[in-house]
Amino acid sequence: MKRMLSAALGLAILTGASLAQGSDQADLQAKYEAKLEKEFVSKIAWTQDLSEAQKKAKESGKLILGYFTRSYAP
Amino acid sequence: MEGGALLSDWWVEFSKDVVPYLNVTTRLEDSSDTHVFGQIGGTGFPTTVFMDHTGAVLTDSWMYPGELKTLEEAKAEALENLAELDELRAQAAKNPDDKAAQGALKLALALRHSGSLTREEFEAIAKLNGVPRSLVERYRTQLLVEELEAAQKVAGESATSREEFTAAVGEAFYAIFKSGKRLPIDHEMATGLYGYAMDHALEIGDGATAEAAFLEFEKAMNLAAEENPDAKERIDAQVDEKRQAVKSMVSGGAK
């Protein structure tokens, strides 16, 4: 019985963790979407897929200018 | 952070002559492009970098595109590096059985974060006649920088205070210096490597290593003073202080 109780507690803890993680993911998604709403994103024609950027660079003979930023923190 | 330059007219015009690629690290579980930041050797945000159509990284310096001049200089540097890479590609394509030509290309691509190279593969390539020594030295420097960064990371994870961090980095950099590894004096981490190694050597009473590290430290600091005339007085004072400390230890008959 004790073992079953421990297992049940473990499940509860895991479920709690999953919920917290889900909430974190929702928060990260919201931050990402907010980042994409920023003016600098709509200001020029960014490509957000590296393979696509490489294809365009090959076809045009231009260099890729990669700009790396983050959305999870300011 | 992403106001100013990235909203300016010159940025909009400049972007038309390149393929602008935006990579946002999100920490989302299903984010597809997050790994690219690590792949290009990125260490901080934001980072701007020029790449060719294969994804080879063509600029050594990481920067925020704060002004057009910086961006134009970086583009010129990228084009020079691309010309060098294309020459190695051409040589390798023309001589498929030439180990030096193949090795030089592999080394150049690894330096440009495009393709991997094990330590053993690197050492084998380094021994080949015909592989440009400059490429070998640049790769050796890159390996050393990775080693120094890893030591700093370990120190940062275990230290609970600034003093503990400094002591751990000092011990690690001292061991690296003692093993004979050196950075070019114009490398941005040179004063750090030699300064920490010297301080640790002074602390444990190793006069010979302190003296050897000081000589490298002095050269790197003199170069920094030349490049930053406004800071020359402060840099000279720091060098003098270290010189006195080393001199006093050596003349005191330390081991």
Image: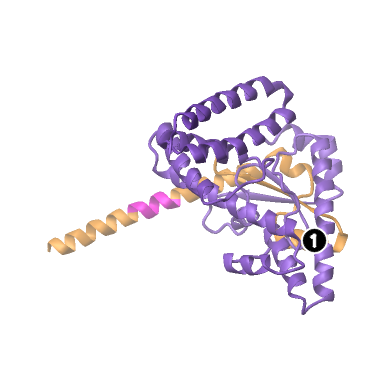
Left or right: B235, with B73 as reference point: left
* Residue to which mark 1 is pinned: B85
Q: Quadrant of residue B33?
A: bottom right
Where is residue B142 shown, x and y percent of the image? 63, 53
Would you say residue A21 sits in the magenta stretch? yes
Between residue B74 and residue B125, name the one nearer to us.
B125
Left or right: B143, with B227 as reference point: left
In the image, residue A46 above or below residue A57: above
Q: Residue at x 47, y 45 (%)?
A: B172
Residue with the most extreme left position: A1
Residue B249, visible in the rendered structure: yes
Q: Please tell me how many numbered marks the rendered image carries.
A: 1
Where is residue A40 shown, x and y percent of the image? 73, 40
Chain shown in purple = B
Residue with the most extreme bottom position: B97
Task: Specify the quadrant that holds the C terminus of chain A.
Answer: top right
Between residue B22 and residue B95, name the one nearer to us.
B95
Give the colouring mode of the picture.
by chain
Q: Which residues are magenta?
A: A16-22
Dot 1: few (<14), some (14–19), or many (≥20) neighbours within 10 Å? Answer: some
Q: Colour of chain A?
A: orange
Q: Residue at x 32, y 56 (%)?
A: A14
Between residue B46 and residue B116, name the one nearer to us.
B116
Q: Residue at x 62, y 66 (%)?
A: B123
Where is residue A66 shown, x and y percent of the image? 73, 50
Overall secondary structure of the magenta stretch? helix
